[in-house]
Every structure is written in C-alpha cells, then in structure tokens.
Image (cartoon, rainbow, N blue to C red):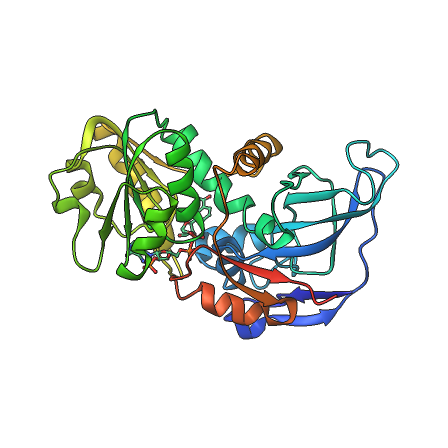
Amino acid sequence: MKAILCPKYGAPDVLEYTDIEMPTIGDDQMLIRVRAASVNPADWRPMRGEPALFVRPIMGLRKPNNPRMGIDLAGQVQAVGKNVTEFKPGDEVYGASKGAFAEYVSSYGKSLVPKPANLTFEQAAAVPVAAITALQALRDHGQLQPGQNVLINGAAGGVGTFTVQIAKAFGAHITAVCSARNIDLVRSLGADRVIDYTRENFIRRDQRYDLIVDNVGNCSLRACLRVIHPHGRFVVAGGPKGRWLAPMMPFIKVKVLSPFVSQKLIGFIATTNKPDLLFLKELIEANTLTPVVDRCYPLSQVADAIRYAETGHARGKIVITPEN
Ligand SMILES: NC(=O)c1ccc[n+]([C@@H]2O[C@H](COP(=O)([O-])OP(=O)(O)OC[C@H]3O[C@@H](n4cnc5c(N)ncnc54)[C@H](OP(=O)(O)O)[C@@H]3O)[C@@H](O)[C@H]2O)c1
C-alpha cells in the first residue's frame, strides 16, 4: 500500500511517498481503510524534530523512531480482530490514529468513533485534533460559561475555526482576532466582533474578557492580563515556530507567572478521546459545528500540503485524500 514516511528530521523534502507492507492486525485491533486525513502542526513540528528539546527525547534523538506520518483520519473499517466488538467491517469511523497519511492503518480504536452521518470523509477528517483542542481549551481549561466574553487569538486556522464555533455553541460573546482576508469567514462562524491584527492590537482596546484562548502564542502575557477580568482565564493552545524552546515559551511563561497573578493561566496539550469525539459528532449532526476545509491534496502531495500548512495562514483545515 502507499504511505508517507518521514525517515529523517527536516523540511517537507524529507518525506517519501512509497510502498510499504499492508499492516497486520492483532486480536484487539482493526484495519481501517483511510478515506481522508488532515494536517496538523502535530505532523509538521515532529517532522522537523522541533522543538528539539521536547520532541527528540520522545520521538527519537537522531531520526523518528516511527517514520509513519499523520494522525487525523476518517475511513472505513476493513477488518477487525477477534476481540473487537464495538465495530464491524464496513463501519465508517473518524478520529485519530498514528500513520493516517497512508491507504490503511491498523488501530486499537482508542480514539475512533462512528463518523458524523452528515459529513463527507474529507470534512470528518478535518475535525479530530483541531476540534478537540478547541473544545478542551474552552470547556475544560477555560470553563467558559454562557454570556461570558471570550477573545480567540488565531481564529481563522484549524483550531481557531472550531474555537469560534464551539464558543458560539456554549453561548459566549466572541471577539475573534485574524487578518483582514478572514474577517468575513470568522464572522460567518459566529464571531460577534472581529479584530484585524494587522491594523489593531487587541490589548489596546477597553474591552475586558473572561477568557482569552491563544492559538498563536505571540501575545505579551503581561499585556494580555490587563484585558482579562481579575478572575478570568488565559489558555494557551499554540506557540510560534522555532527549533529549540520558542514553541514552548508561551507554555513556560504561563507556568512561571501563574502564582503571581489573580487570573488563572493555563497551557495545555490536548488529548484525543472517544467521549470528546462523540460530543463533537453531536454538535456536527445538530449543524452547530461545521469543519472549514481550506484545501485538499492527494496523498502523494503531502509534502506540498505541509509546505502550505507551515505558512501559518491556512483558512481552516488542510485535507489529504488517498488516490485509491
Ligand atoms: N495544545 C495543543 O494540544 C494543540 C493542538 C493543536 C494545535 N496546537 C497549536 O495551536 C496552534 C494553531 O494550530 P492550527 O492547527 O490552528 O494552526 P493553523 O491552522 O496553521 O493556524 C493558522 C492560522 O493562524 C492565524 N494567524 C497567523 N498569525 C496570526 C497572528 N499574528 N494573529 C492572529 N492569527 C494569526 C492565521 O490567520 P491569518 O491568515 O488571518 O493570519 C491562520 O488562519 C499551533 O501553534 C499549534 O501547534 C496545539
């Protein structure tokens, strides 16, 4: 079968579109035919082995221990091991499983659930990591309540487009930060107010927020605290690009400053899980949440898809489709 491999750390040129053995499955596993996958920073940051101090001790010091790429997928169950009772061949699923940039993956199914009935495979593959990150930022770490004021920095990307829609579903009043070309998009997703960051710095406004979700990691934390209510929250989901520590700096700063301020400061790494995927499926099937798909690339062109993702200016999600 065809798959994308990352045999060494580096720019997208290191990626190989190649033939590998079909995966075999154990008694507790399923074989999934991947109908679509999607790109996340969690694909291209480890591809580069960055941030090195965080990624390389876990994923391999000199080269990736596991060269398979891709996490988010939507597909069809092809075969199940004898202990699998939850799914049967033919079932349509979506979720997360390592190696999604391939025609098939074997999976224990710990983060796979039935696909939302009203989505195409391409749309469903756009959901898992980005929407779970948005959900956990708002609900678990932000503890967002109806009627609260939330500011979403980085509202137009993969995570941002879900953050705006989920905040709307939770009944919040939303201020979204993006560039001029995305103002109409984020407004259509539910933002009540939009700030074009190329013209205005949101921390200069008089507005105060109960919650700021930062999907970019470019804010001055001290300045942000001036626009958050004394018992409000600042949740960091994203960080800038960088080889060593730069991507981790927003997370380190909230940890260091946290004991000294009245607001709650939180940096978090999202965890994919079935209950959250099922929660998102419900929102999607109620037409409260719709993935925004920017571009689709064939599996053979994952390197180009990642080059585009690395510009940091995708509108919503980038989807990959196997050619078979
Ligand atoms: N904590 C976690 O578990 C977790 C999980 C997933 C992702 N993340 C992190 O979350 C971040 C966002 O991920 P993503 O998948 O949404 O990335 P993405 O799709 O590449 O985000 C791109 C978006 O960022 C916006 N943007 C770029 N510069 C901006 C700025 N200065 N101010 C406001 N918006 C800006 C762009 O909007 P314009 O084109 O309008 O500039 C674009 O729409 C990344 O740092 C990623 O590593 C963290």
Residue 25: image location, x then y, percent: 83, 47
Q: Please give the count of numbered marks on the rendered protein.
A: 0
Q: Dividing the image into 4 quarters, which one contains the C terminus?
A: bottom right
Q: Quadrant of residue 166?
A: top left
Residue 271: image location, x then y, percent: 53, 38
- Direction from residue 199 to residue 116 in the image, left or right: right
Q: Quadrant of residue 316?
A: bottom left
- Direction from residue 210 to residue 320 in the image, left or right: right
**Residue 12 visible in the displayed image:** yes
Residue 284: image location, x then y, percent: 54, 38
The residue depicted at 53 percent of the width and 52 percent of the height is 57
Which of the pair 234/181 is nearer the observer? 181
Residue 9: image location, x then y, percent: 54, 66
Q: Dividing the image into 4 quarters, which one contains the N terminus?
A: bottom right
Which of the pair 88/213 is nearer the observer? 88
Q: Residue furthest bottom?
A: 13
The residue depicted at 16 percent of the width and 45 percent of the height is 203
**Residue 262 visible in the displayed image:** no
